[in-house]
């Protein structure tokens, strides 16, 4: 498919990829979030609603650009500037509930709270870098598309690990007796993400470089979450977060997201040509 100006629209199968991501999200979070929707903590809604809208936004962007509906594509893209602070604020809400659960003695969060914290912190960093670069390179079609399409991969391991934990008996978590395999399902889900990125890079090479940026963060998550169990520094941070008002934690995330939207938009603006130079030209 060819876009306006004769450029080829990249990732022609992107809408199907995003639909698969959505299906995995629904399947993975059905039992823990969608089915008991009215009974889950508000922090889950802050994250779940914002992250779901974000994935749908990426889907809408992909469909509209492939159909040549560029004005709609641009309008949806501009809406992401407003949505991104809520996306990062939602992730901060999960960090908040992790800290609150840790000091309250929640079994899962006291056991794996440190791993969750470092994984979430790296997810925030990954989203910030990917989205900033998507905005900065919004006039370069392969780079912009790659960075935007890489964003759903950052938290894909969370629902996918639940799916494989349901269907693969060796990775099923039934209680504290299965603590040893709890992180294994997450690591295998991340390995699947890296396999997808490897295939993209093998087929597209330099054009798929945005996905290599995502891969670097996923590898960092695998290493830190796999090796930093019972880390005293992370657990001390969880205690601090658990004692800080929730509004402070969430608004900090919102501020980080807002700053990223502003900085990325500014970085991607066309250079201003001085009046004298323009007239001489």
Image (cartoon, grey):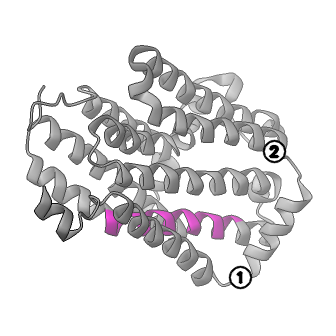
Q: Residue at x 73, y 38 (%)?
A: 183
Q: At numbered mark 1, what does the secondary structure look like: helix, strand or loop?
A: loop
Labels 1 & 2 near each other (Cβ < 8 A): no
Say above or below: 193 vs 272: above
Check residue 176 in the rendering and tell me which mark sits there, or answer none: 2
**Residue 251 shows in the view:** yes
- The local crowd at label 1, few if under 14, some if 14 to 19, many if 20 or more residues have their Cα within 10 Å, is some
Locate the N terminus and report the quarter of the image it occupies.
top left
Q: Quadrant of residue 5?
A: top left
Locate the C terminus and report the quarter of the image it occupies.
bottom left
**Residue 38 shows in the view:** no
Q: Is residue 180 magenta?
A: no
Q: At numbered mark 2, what does the secondary structure look like: helix, strand or loop?
A: helix
Q: Position of residue 206 (x, y in %)?
A: 43, 25
Q: Seen in the image, is 208 located left or right of residue 123?
A: left
Q: Residue at x 78, y 72 (%)?
A: 104
Quickly name the residue at label 1: 244
Q: Position of residue 244 (x, y in %)?
A: 71, 82
| The residue stretch that appears in magenta | 81-98
Mark closer to the chain start, 1 or 2: 2
Name the residue nearer the viewer: 25 or 207: 207
């Amino acid at each position: 498919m060819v876009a306006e100006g004769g450029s080829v629209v990249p990732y022609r199968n992107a809408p199907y990829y995003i639909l698969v991501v959505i299906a995995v999200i629904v399947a993975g979070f059905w039992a823990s979030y969608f089915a008991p929707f009215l009974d889950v903590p508000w922090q889950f809604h802050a994250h779940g609603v914002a992250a779901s809208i974000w994935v749908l936004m990426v889907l809408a962007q992909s469909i509209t650009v492939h159909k040549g509906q560029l004005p709609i594509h641009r309008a949806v893209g501009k809406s992401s500037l407003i949505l991104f602070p809520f996306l990062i604020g939602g992730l901060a809400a999960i960090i908040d509930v992790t800290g609150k659960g840790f000091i309250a003695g929640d079994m899962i969060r006291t056991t794996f709270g440190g791993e969750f914290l470092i994984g979430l912190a790296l997810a925030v960093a990954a989203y910030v870098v990917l989205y900033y670069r998507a905005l900065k390179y919004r006039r370069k079609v392969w780079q912009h598309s790659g960075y935007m399409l890489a964003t759903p991969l950052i938290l894909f391991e969370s629902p996918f690990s639940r799916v494989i934990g349901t269907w693969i008996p060796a990775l099923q978590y039934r209680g504290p007796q299965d603590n040893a395999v709890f992180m294994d399902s997450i690591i295998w889900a991340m390995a699947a993400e890296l396999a997808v990125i490897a295939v993209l890079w093998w087929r597209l090479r330099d054009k798929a470089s945005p996905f290599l940026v995502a891969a670097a963060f996923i590898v960092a998550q695998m290493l830190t979450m796999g090796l930093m169990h019972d880390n005293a520094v992370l657990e001390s941070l969880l205690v601090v977060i658990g004692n800080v008002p929730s509004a402070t934690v969430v608004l900090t995330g919102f501020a980080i997201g807002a700053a990223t939207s502003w900085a990325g938009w500014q970085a991607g603006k066309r250079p201003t040509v001085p009046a004298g130079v323009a007239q001489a030209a």
